Amino acid sequence: MHIDQTRPVPAKRRQRKGTRERLSEALIALAEGKARITAHSEKGWASITFAGARHRVELLFEGAEAVEAGECFIAFLPEHEFSIPGQLVADAAVTEVDHTVEPPHMVVTAEILVLEEG
């Protein structure tokens, strides 16, 4: 008698989105889906009362329509109300803009301070 010992294939686990992924999605939504993130770094940040991370994100807007969305992104980012579960965006600012007319494209660098709620 021969018994075939096959192991069941484990089901794929659904990965939970972290703060970085949720922030990226929120920024792309604010950019009306007309940008792509070309760089994203984060550095832990803490004070006596708060902990979180400072994110530096570079977004690329390509084409006239995208550049127009980028201009709106620049205007609205500082006052935007982010909705990231368990996190609070304490500060969001555009720190650098590189704009080219022909061909139309714009690179926007933003720094966002995200604090852990609780």
Image (tube, helix red, strand yellow):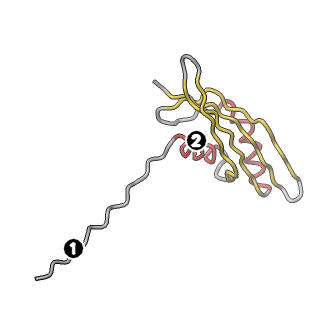
Count of marks, rendered view: 2
Amino acid carrying label 1: it is Gln
What residue is disc 1 on? Answer: 5
Per the image, label 2 sits on a secondary structure element best described as helix
Residue at position x 67%, y 51% in the image: 37
Give the farthest residue toward the right.
Answer: 102
Residue at position x 58%, y 24% in the image: 46
Looking at the rendering, in which quadrant would you find the N terminus? bottom left
- Residue 114 in the image: x percent, y percent? 58, 31
Identify the mark at residue 45; answer none if there is no mark: none
- Residue 71 in the image: x percent, y percent? 77, 43
Amino acid carrying label 2: it is Leu
- The vertical placement of 49 against 95, above or below, is above
- Classify residue 66 as left or right of residue 15: right
Q: Give the quarter of the image for residue 113.
A: top right
- Residue 105 in the image: x percent, y percent? 81, 54
What residue is disc 2 on? Answer: 23
- Classify residue 66 as left or right of residue 91: right
Per the image, label 1 sits on a secondary structure element best described as loop
